[in-house]
């Protein structure tokens, strides 16, 4: 598909002996913000790792920008924010951003722009280890976006952020998408889902919905996404299963 | 090649901005001056030999503090004390990437793993060159001041002696840095890597050398340990062995050539082993 940035086909992933994804398939349109929603342990992070190309898969395919996930040529096209921040706590925000910029062959200018993009300009000279949890996470986000990637995979980027900052971050995500970046953003907070172009609802490693927020709500017969998620789960349960 | 250059540039930036590097470098240079010059000079000025220099006549103590003796004085503290600092540096640099979780981002988005590791190693060896150069410059300056203060002639060591000592110092520090890098990669944790490295360098090697006196097979092993090679290289330059009331870590087990070759082999082996582990093992 021409407009598809990420395509997952029949993906099966086991972590240890435990099956995590069971024949998962989805397509993520280019230049969109796609929300990956589901409860903790549903397989969101595993799917993201598979898309980024760091997860061993049992079967199935993951294609990113027309290349197999993990392909060398995708390295500079991908930005990945892990759940746990991955920045040096004993360097300042600016030093961290400049470190990652240098790693990608970029200048200080791009590093400073990334810091501005995540709203950390005032804290740029602070040691990352001295930042609050939310600032720490944003410092990590700055390092993930410093290379201006075409694909941005963000694992729970708004955890620990106050409502104002969360709102600002979502506006930034929208801005990235408008500039052509494809975003896959995981969350287990349903009120963030309305900000996405599309939603992937995942539970126990299975896709239970893949549509726009409005369509998901309509198909579940409710205006509330939380309730829609519950309705879709219940609708998918076979008789005799416990709820 | 582009990836290696980018990684080297990034790692140099990181090391330069890293407070721990300045602390370790400062401590290393301070120890070098304290044990190489300050204590001996104070004991010489006091007229009564300290515990360290009591077996030496005051003239012998002074001659060891003059510029002609700088190559030996500089290298003698490196096999053990200086080496441990570099061991910690290597362990923290590599282990820190796991501890802070940064390797996973680097390996996902940055240059190839081989380039990322190569850049880190080049940056670490650049630090080694800077530290060795700083130690020589500082020691030459201190020795010159002492010579002037004591109205001694400014006799310089031969250029070959300086080059040999400089090369030996680089080799000793490079070996310990590579050993630290391997420990950091093996442990995947800075704290564990530092602990294990120090245990090896300060306790286990010395214990093995102690046991070697009574057990033949252990002696063969003890004679080729990394610390033995480093201490022997310093000893081959004229540093007094610890067993002869000299500096801890200085040995006369091996002659200069074999010690240098062994150090080079250890440096290469540690560097390659750490690289292979980093490249082949899962990190995220």
Image: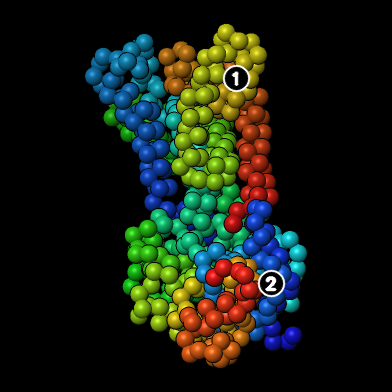
State the image coordinates of residue A83 (x, y, percent, origin top left): 50, 64
State the image coordinates of residue A210 (x, y, percent, origin top left): 62, 82
Judging by the rendered image, the residue that carries numbered circle 1 is B222
Q: Chain of mark 2?
A: A
Q: Residue at x 60, y 53 (%)?
A: B283
Q: Residue at x 37, y 45 (%)?
A: B23
Helix, strand or loop at label 2? It is strand
The N terminus of chain A is located in which quarter?
A: bottom right
Q: Nearer the viewer, residue A223 or A7?
A: A223
Q: Nearer the viewer, residue A29 or A58?
A: A58
Residue B120 visible within the image: yes
Q: Nearer the viewer, residue A179 or B53?
A: A179
Q: Which mark is residue A24?
A: 2
Q: Residue at x 35, y 37 (%)?
A: B30
Mark 2 Cα shell of 10 Å, populated few (<14), some (14-19), many (≥20) = some
The C terminus of chain A is located in which quarter?
A: bottom right
Helix, strand or loop at label 1? It is helix
Q: Residue at x 28, y 20 (%)?
A: B43
Q: Chain of mark 1?
A: B
């Amino acid at each position: 598909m021409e407009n598809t940035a990420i395509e997952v086909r029949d993906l099966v992933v086991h972590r240890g002996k435990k099956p995590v994804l069971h024949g998962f398939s989805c397509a993520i349109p280019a230049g969109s913000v796609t929300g990956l929603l589901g409860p903790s342990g549903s397989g969101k992070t595993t799917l993201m790792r598979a898309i980024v190309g760091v997860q061993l898969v049992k079967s199935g395919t993951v294609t990113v920008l027309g290349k197999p996930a993990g392909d060398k040529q995708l390295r500079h096209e991908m930005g990945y924010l892990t759940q746990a921040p991955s920045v040096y706590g004993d360097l300042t925000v600016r030093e961290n951003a400049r470190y990652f910029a240098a790693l990608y062959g970029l200048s200080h200018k791009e590093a400073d722009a990334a810091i501005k993009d995540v709203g950390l300009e005032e804290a740029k000279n602070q040691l990352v280890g001295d930042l609050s949890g939310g600032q720490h996470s944003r410092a990590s986000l700055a390092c993930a976006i410093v290379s201006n990637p075409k694909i941005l995979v963000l694992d729970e980027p708004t955890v620990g952020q106050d409502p104002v900052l969360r709102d600002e971050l979502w506006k930034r995500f929208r801005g990235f998408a408008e500039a052509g970046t494809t975003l896959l953003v995981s969350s287990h907070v349903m009120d963030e889902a309305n900000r996405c172009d599309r939603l992937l609802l995942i539970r126990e490693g299975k896709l239970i919905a893949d549509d726009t927020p409005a369509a998901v709500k309509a198909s579940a017969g409710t205006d509330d996404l939380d309730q829609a998620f519950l309705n879709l789960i219940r609708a998918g349960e076979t008789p005799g299963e416990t709820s | 090649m582009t990836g290696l250059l980018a990684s080297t540039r990034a790692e140099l930036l990181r090391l330069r901005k890293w407070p721990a590097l300045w602390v370790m470098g400062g401590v290393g240079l301070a120890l070098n001056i304290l044990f190489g010059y300050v204590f001996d000079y104070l004991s010489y000025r006091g007229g009564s030999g300290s515990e360290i220099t009591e077996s030496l006549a005051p003239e012998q103590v002074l001659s060891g503090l003059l510029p002609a003796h700088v190559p030996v004085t500089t290298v003698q503290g490196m096999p053990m004390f200086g080496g441990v600092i570099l061991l910690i540096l290597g362990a923290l640099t590599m282990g820190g990437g796991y501890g802070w979780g940064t390797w996973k981002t680097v390996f996902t988005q940055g240059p190839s793993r081989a380039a990322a590791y190569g850049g880190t190693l080049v940056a670490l060896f650049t630090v080694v060159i800077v530290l060795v150069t700083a130690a020589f410059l500082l020691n030459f300056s201190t020795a010159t001041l002492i010579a002037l203060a004591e109205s001694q002639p400014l006799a310089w060591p031969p250029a070959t002696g300086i080059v040999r000592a400089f090369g030996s110092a680089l080799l000793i520090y490079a070996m310990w840095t590579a050993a630290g890098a391997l420990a950091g990669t093996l442990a995947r944790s800075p704290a564990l890597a530092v602990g294990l490295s120090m245990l090896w360098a300060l306790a286990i090697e010395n214990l093995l050398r102690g046991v070697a006196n009574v057990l033949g097979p252990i002696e063969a092993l003890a004679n080729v340990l990394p610390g033995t090679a480093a201490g022997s290289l310093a000893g081959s330059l004229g540093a007094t062995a610890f067993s002869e009331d000299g500096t801890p870590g200085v040995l006369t087990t091996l002659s200069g050539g074999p010690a240098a070759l062994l150090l080079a082999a250890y440096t290469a082996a540690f560097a390659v082993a750490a690289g292979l582990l980093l490249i082949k093992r899962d990190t995220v």
